[in-house]
Amino acid sequence: MTFKAPKNHKTWTIAMPEALAAILKSHRAAQAEERLFLGPAYKDQDLVFAHADGTAIDPWNFGSAVLDLILRAGVTPITLHGLRDAHASLCAKAGVPLEVVSNRLGHASTGVTASRYLHVYSDRDAEAASAFDRLVG
């Protein structure tokens, strides 16, 4: 498996909710048990999501597994990229500033984010007008 650098060749760090951090810590502990069980047969590539032997999961298979989980959960089917878009849109609707959403997505500039998600921010225009009216009214 070949790993590719991000499109803009930069890495970035974002905050995550505590509940997600707890789930990932639990997952990491299970991986540590697999690593111990397999010993030298474990191929440690420091991956969050991997086969039981540590090797990388093919992206196509990973996306397929996520879709399977979504269908079993009985929620509306969505792709991994759709989950990314939903995260960005929900953050925008919650009032998260454009530059923060842009950074979370790893966009090279806020212009990239604005061109894709500006409609979500535009929906907040009426709220801004009402807020201003309350302030000066």
Image (cartoon, grey):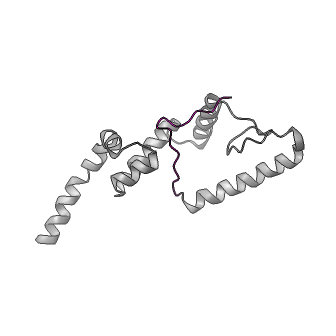
Give x and y (percent) for residue 33.
Answer: 83, 51
Q: Is residue 1 above or below residue 130?
A: above
- Magenta stretch in the rendered image: 1-15
Q: Is residue 83 above or below residue 99?
A: above
Q: Main secondary structure of the magenta part?
A: loop
Judge whether 116 appears above or below 16 on screen.
Answer: above
- Asked if the magenta segment contains residue 22, the reply would be no
Q: Is residue 84 above or below residue 26?
A: above
The image position of residue 20, as x and y in percent, is 59, 56
Which residue is found at the position 24% from the left and 48% from the top? 122
Q: Is residue 127 left or right of residue 14?
A: left
Which residue is rendered at x = 58% and y = 37% of the image? 71
Q: Residue at x 61, y 28 (%)?
A: 60
The quarter of the displayed image where residue 112 is located: top left
The number of discs equals 0
Q: How far across and down, in percent of the image, does residue 111 sit?
A: 31, 42
* Residue at figure coordinates x 58%, y 33% from the top left: 4
Q: Is residue 38 visible?
A: yes
- Residue 66 x, y percent position in the rendering: 60, 38
Q: Is residue 136 left or right of residue 107?
A: left
Q: In this view of the protein, can residue 77 be seen by the observer?
A: no
Please identify the residue farthest to the front as the structure is shown.
9
Q: Residue furthest left?
A: 137
Quadrant into which the C terminus falls: bottom left
- Nearer to the camera, 20 or 113: 113
Q: Is residue 5 magenta?
A: yes
Q: Quadrant of the N terminus?
A: top right
- Which one is nearer the viewer's eye here, 5 or 102? 5
Nearer the observer, 62 or 9: 9
Quadrant in the picture for residue 135: bottom left
